[in-house]
Image (cartoon, rainbow, N blue to C red):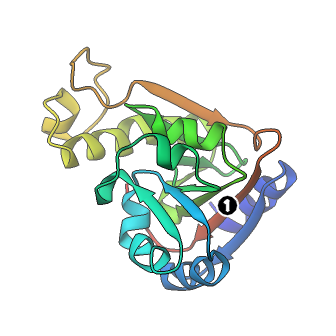
Amino acid sequence: MELSVAATNLEARGYQVEVFSTAKEAADYLDARLDGMTIGFGGSMSLGAMQLYERLSAHNTVFSHLHGHPAGPDAAFAQLYITSANGLAETGEIVNIDGIGNRLAGTLFGHERVIFVIGRNKLAPTLDEAIHRARNIAGPMNARRKNARTPCAVKADHCYDCKSPERICRALLILWEPMMGMEAEVVLVDEDLGF
């Protein structure tokens, strides 16, 4: 699998794409580019690993439920929404799973722009394999991180399609193309980031 192939396919689908060798280069790019904006942050270990909240909040107004802001109105009405993905097909489809819905909603509506920051570990050859990755790798690891009492959190080995009240994978979103009326950018990083 190649990030360059994914980049070409994402561009063909209407995304602006930037590719970086390291997370630091990607963080430097975003830090220099985003200034004086209101930014909603999706719950993302990728963004956390890059310390983007700390960097961007120095000169932007950033709303992040992982940093004490509610996962609601402020982030929902920010100019820009930035998040990652649970899976990216080399063919250009972006896959995300969510339990509350704020992260999915943020990529669909209400913002002038959305930026996805995606590490190479999220890349899969096909859409089916990107969905499999989201359900069976990212989902269980996120459930374990949140100390959820679900079968996948206990073993972190695959999705059990459980009926637990603590289930964090309640919706699956596939973006074939950016939403109408919203600018969308994908920042690809040739390093492993997040789950």
Q: Quadrant of the N terminus?
A: bottom right
Q: Residues within 10 Å of mark 1 (few under 14, many from 20)?
A: many
| 7 shown above or below 164 | below
Residue 4 seen in the current view = yes
Q: Residue 60, percent across and down?
A: 53, 72
| 9 shown above or below 73 | below
Q: Which residue is mark 1?
A: 186
Q: Which residue is at 43% across, 34% downward?
A: 98
Q: Residue 151, percent across and down?
A: 17, 28
Q: Which residue is at 39% across, 31% downward?
A: 100
Rendering quarter of residue 2: bottom right
| 174 shown above or below 75 | above
Rendering quarter of residue 5: bottom right
Q: Amino acid at mark 1?
A: Val
Q: Quadrant of the C terminus?
A: bottom left
What is the secondary structure assignment of the residue under circle 1? Answer: strand
Rendering quarter of residue 190: bottom right
Q: Which residue is at 46% across, 32% downward?
A: 101
| 194 shown above or below 43 | below
Q: Residue 86, percent across and down?
A: 48, 47
Residue 193 seen in the current view = no
Q: Residue 129, percent across and down?
A: 54, 39
Using residue 155 as the reference point, say whether residue 190 is left or right of it: right
